[in-house]
Image (cartoon, helix red, strand yellow):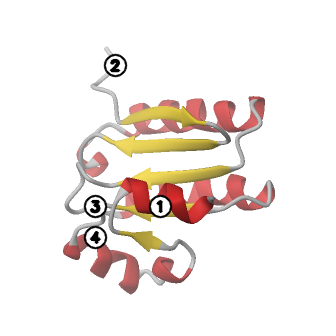
Amino acid sequence: MPGPNVFHVERNDTTLLVVPQHNISTLAAENIQAELQAIMDILAANDIRDVVVDLEHVPHFGSEMLGALHVIWKRVRAAEGKMLLCNVSPVGQEILQVAKFDALWPIHGSRSEALAALS
């Protein structure tokens, strides 16, 4: 039986908005991989160039989330797009800094700021 949705995904013109719904490290890897593959399929099948990941529902995260973000980023980078993060908690910012991913993905305070930065 599949678990709860890991990611909420919506399109905003040529930008895909990805919103993790909760800490994915506690979920089965199959659920994460299936939803991540669905995101990759959306990116491959559409004219979507950029991705905004809104972490408002995820105050902390581990290697599963970092791995998922990295997979998305590699696809976006291959398409010469940008990936931005927003609504990152202080703990989340520390995790990104330790992993050195804060240098890869610009962090914005809100979803509207991130979307405006892509304009």
Under circle 2, the secondary element is loop
| Residue 26 point in image, percent of width and height | 23, 46
Instruction: Tell me, yes or no, if residue 97 can be seen here.
Output: yes
Position of the C terminus by quadrant: bottom right
What residue is shown with label 1? Answer: 114
Pick whichever of labels 1 and 2 is earlier in the sequence: 2
Q: Mark 1 belongs to which amino acid? A: Ala
Q: Which is more toward the observer, 31 or 53? A: 53
Pick whichever of labels 3 and 2 is earlier in the sequence: 2
What residue is shown with label 3? Answer: 61
Label 3, label 2: how many angstroms apart (C-alpha)? 21 Å
Counting the numbered discs, the total is: 4
6 on left or right of 69: left
What residue is shown with label 4? Answer: 92
Q: Mark 2 belongs to which amino acid? A: Pro
Label 2, label 4: how many angstroms apart (C-alpha)? 27 Å
Rendered residue at 73%/62% (across/down) = 77
Instruction: Tell me, yes or no, if residue 66 can be seen here.
Output: no
Q: Are marks 4 and 3 in contact (CB under 8 Å)?
A: yes
Q: Is residue 109 above or below residue 42?
A: below
Rendered residue at 30%/66% (across/down) = 88
